[in-house]
Image (cartoon, rainbow, N blue to C red):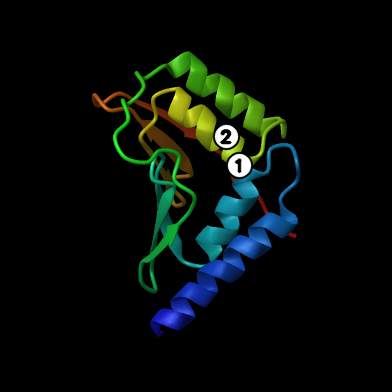
Amino acid sequence: MTTTDTVNRLQAALERGAAVRPKVGGFPYLAESLRQAGVTHCRMAVPAGAFLYLTRHGNVVVQGEPLVAGFAAAPRFDEAALIAALRTDQAGESTFPEFVRGCWDAGILWYEVDTTERTCTYYGADGESYTEDYPPVALP
């Protein structure tokens, strides 16, 4: 598989996941679309807005909109604030950029989705972490 094929496969999986996910509780649908396309892990560097997708076909980096430029103090890890951001997102009450901002405000510097284990782990600057499982789903 060529690099272009790998990128196209990832783009198609992201588009499919976005198309089938319900407004409430939609993340597992996106994650399942990625898993079916061969993505094993997705890592996001929150302040940089950058994703790394590890796939069985090759790895892909996607640069999003950074949250900070230049020097910035890393917020302290706040598990309660992270859980609040997660629940707001899971209820369909935030956009993805708002969710990412909520992660940053809660002191999350990066997170990793493991599509095999169906987990998402959020990390703070001093080694703190919080992990949530997400349910298996069937895509339409």
Of 66 and 117, the residue lying toward us: 66
The amino acid beneath tag 1 is Phe
* Rendered view: 49 above or below 59: above
Q: State the separation of the CA atoms marked 1 and 2.
A: 5 Å
The kind of residue on which mark 2 rests is Phe
Q: Position of residue 105 (x, y in %)?
A: 46, 24
User: Element type at marker 1?
Assistant: helix
Q: Is residue 27 above or below residue 6?
A: above
What residue appears at the point 60 percent right and 34 percent down from the top-left corner? Answer: 98
Give the percent coordinates (x, y) of residue 35. 51, 59
Please name the residue that numbered disc 1 is placed on: 96
Residue 54 location (% of width, % of height): 37, 61
Q: Local crowd at mark 1 within 10 Å, few (<14), some, or many (≥20)?
A: few
Quadrant where the C terminus sits is bottom right
Please say whether residue 139 is visible from this viewpoint. no
Residue marked by disc 2: 99
Identified at 47% across, 51% down, the residue is 115
Q: Is residue 6 above or below residue 123?
A: below
The quadrant where residue 4 appears:
bottom left
In the displayed orientation, state which residue is furthest to the left: 126
